[in-house]
């Protein structure tokens, strides 16, 4: 469900009770059929409430004494109506900007994120057993199990660039962008590592997932890999 201006106007009209009976029925049916659209409506409802509580409450307190004295006159006055209209416009524009930006970065992430295929799982030595056993878990998409095994290795040797890199990617695949950023930031500090360029790419994706678009652009600008160059072009308009 695209969060374009048409969708935003439709949701605004819904919250302003400006839909006719047929459009309202279609709107409610759309919410039933499309979870993404329903989530977008709920997110905007939450944001509107937050902005209203922060702004309209203060404004109402400023006007409270005057409204009590002349309630009908003040309520219908052009200045008060203009103020209320300004607040509604501010809420609508701010909400659309926040949701549009966040949804755009989420869409770019979803379109570009694919977990690293991993390393061959040839358990040749006992010293590498835990790592490669974790790699088996990773390739089976058992990311939590892989992370658990690799975190033990990381605690013993935090300078192991292979473990650091795959901990970052596994956490990102497991839906933990913040933890992924931690490991991938560490991997970024190892420019001689064979995983360096890939670490920059996945770090940028982790930042996008957290809606840190400007930081993602800075990371991608440092990379020369084709994947990073393409991703940077995609997020430049954001």
Image (tube, grey):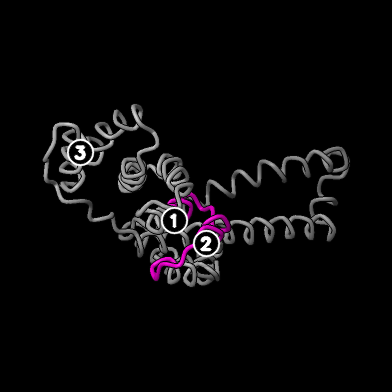
Tell me the residue that label 1 is attached to: 200
Quadrant for the C terminus in the image: bottom right
Q: Residue at x 28, y 55 (%)?
A: 116
- Asked whether the residues under the numbered discs 1 and 2 touch, taking CB atoms below 8 Å apart as contact, a structural biologist would say yes
* Contact check, label 3 and label 1, Cβ < 8 Å: no
Q: Quadrant of the N terminus?
A: bottom left
Q: Does the magenta portion include 95? A: no
Disc 2 secondary structure class: loop
Q: Which residue is mark 3?
A: 134
Can you say whether 167 is above or below 43 in the image?
Answer: above
Kindly report which numbered mark, 2 or 3, lies closer to the viewer in this rendering: 2
Q: Report the Cα–Cα distance between label 3 and label 1.
A: 23 Å
Q: Residue at x 23, y 38 (%)?
A: 146
In the rendered view, does 218 fall on the left or right side of 85?
left
The answer to if 220 sits in the magenta stretch is yes
Q: Position of residue 177 (x, y in %)?
A: 41, 45
Which numbered disc flags the more N-terminal residue, 2 or 3? 3
Q: The residue tagged with tag 3: helix, strand or loop?
A: helix
Q: Residue at x 45, y 67 (%)?
A: 224
**Which range is magenta?**
203-228
Report the disc number at residue 222: 2
Left or right of 61 on screen, residue 157: left
| Residue 95 percent coordinates (x, y) | 59, 56
Please count the marks in the image: 3
Q: Is residue 236 visible?
A: yes
Tell me how far mark 2 sits from mark 3, CA to CA.
Answer: 30 Å
Query: Could you tell which of marks 1 and 2 lies nearer the N-terminus?
Result: 1
Q: Mark 1 falls on what kind of element?
A: helix
């Amino acid at each position: 469900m695209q969060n374009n201006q048409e969708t935003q106007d439709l949701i605004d009209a819904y919250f302003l009770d400006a839909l006719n009976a047929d459009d309202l029925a279609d709107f409610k049916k759309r919410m039933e059929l499309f979870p993404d659209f329903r989530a977008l409506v709920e997110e905007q409802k939450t944001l509107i409430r937050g902005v209203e509580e922060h702004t309209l409450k203060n404004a109402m307190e400023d006007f409270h004494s005057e409204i009590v004295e002349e309630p009908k006159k003040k309520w219908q006055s052009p200045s008060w109506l203009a103020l209320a209209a300004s607040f509604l416009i501010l809420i609508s524009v701010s909400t659309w900007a926040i949701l549009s930006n966040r949804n755009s970065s989420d869409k770019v992430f979803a379109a570009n994120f694919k977990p690293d295929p991993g390393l061959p799982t040839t358990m040749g030595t006992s010293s590498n057993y835990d790592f490669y056993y974790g790699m088996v878990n990773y390739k089976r998409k058992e990311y939590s199990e892989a992370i658990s095994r690799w975190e033990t290795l990381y605690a013993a040797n935090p300078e192991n660039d292979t473990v650091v890199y795959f901990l970052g990617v596994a956490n990102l695949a497991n839906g933990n962008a913040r933890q992924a950023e931690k490991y991938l930031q560490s991997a970024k500090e190892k420019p001689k590592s064979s995983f360096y360029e890939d670490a920059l790419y996945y770090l940028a994706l982790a930042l996008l997932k957290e809606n840190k678009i400007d930081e993602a652009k800075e990371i991608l600008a440092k990379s020369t890999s084709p994947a990073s160059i393409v991703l940077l072009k995609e997020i430049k308009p954001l």
